[in-house]
Image (tube, grey):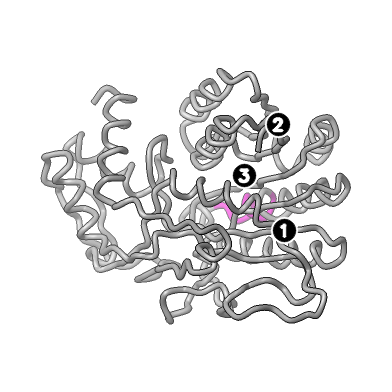
Amino acid sequence: MNNRRILVTGTAGFIGFHLAKLLLSEGCRVQGYDGMTDYYDVSLKRRRHEILLEHQNFSTTEGMLEDQATFDELADQFQPDVIVHLAAQAGVRYSFENPRAYINSNVIGTFNVMEAARRLGVQHLLIASTSSVYGANTEMPFSEMEKADTQLTMYAATKKANESMAHSYAHLYDLPTTMFRFFSVYGTWGRPDLALYKFVDAMLDGRPIDIYNHGEMYRDFTYVDDLVRAIRLLVDAVPVRPSTGIVPDGDSLSPVAPFRIVNIGNSEKIRLLDFIDAIEECLGIKAIRNGMEMQTGDVPATWADTQLLRTLTGYQPQTDFKDGIARFVDWFRDYYGK
């Protein structure tokens, strides 16, 4: 990986920050691009960038994905070997209030990234998707070979649109593209709208926590360090259009394009109540629990089949959720002085 030039969108974000740190540690030149939107605390985003800027091989440009001219100028100047596209309008709940933000950032913005990748002929384009695209599917663990046509939110719908758009570009322009679907990512430097952050913050302040479906929900909690390690390994797993149109069993590779979808998860479903119990144990605080009904657009369970990731990379995320919670709590207490 030494000296490889990698453009990462969303480097001031939770996952982009961790990925950039990993790539820099391996000697890559990393160019960041981030809109610094105020969806959550911008000071947290700026602090992440300050840490990355301590590395001489990191540089960054501030701009929105929808701003094609700014993004194109950056991409043309940097001439990346690889683009990892993580920036997006995140958050399932917010998509109910402001769906247009998801169209602008996730659809138009992703189109601009794909256009730059096509024009520059990058070696590999990797784009973040989400387990939310599985929508109303009930057969678990979720496999990349399943149909995913029943998205329940605009957030999920825009991510599924990204997958379809990227497949067409891979087919038309022979652009090697990998989509990775995340499953309930958590960890240090996490987003304030994510469950672990909200639970820890409320519990330390003595405020109640809202527990949807009364905690009878299951998630495939994936620690952020495991996630970015998997992304890093997938950078080298470049999809190739099958010359015969025949795809091996268990591979989501397209028969007509250098395009693949890969789940990244712990491949273990954890009950939300058990997750909360572990937070209580770590903090030494009993949560004030506010049991609530299921939210619109939510699903009772997600769980990843990660056999394809193991086949492609030899890697399996495996951080135990109790260890991951402890690392997050240590960071949170240190960062906020609580």
Q: Position of residue 80 (x, y in %)?
A: 77, 38
Task: Identify residue type, mark 1.
Answer: Thr
The residue identified by callout 1 is 177
Q: Position of residue 143 (x, y in %)?
A: 51, 74
Pointer 1 or 3: first along the chain:
3
The residue identified by callout 3 is 87
Label 2, label 3: how many angstroms apart (C-alpha)?
Answer: 23 Å
Pointer 2 or 3: first along the chain:
2
Residue at 54%, 61% in the rendered image: 181
In the rendered picture of this protein, how many numbered marks are placed on residues? 3
Image quarter in which the C terminus is found = top left
Q: Are marks 1 and 2 in contact (CB under 8 Å)?
A: no
Q: Position of residue 99 (x, y in %)?
A: 60, 56
Pointer 1 or 2: first along the chain:
2
Task: Identify residue type, mark 3.
Answer: Ala
Which tag is nearer the camera, tag 2 or tag 3? 2
Q: Which residues are magenta?
A: 98-104
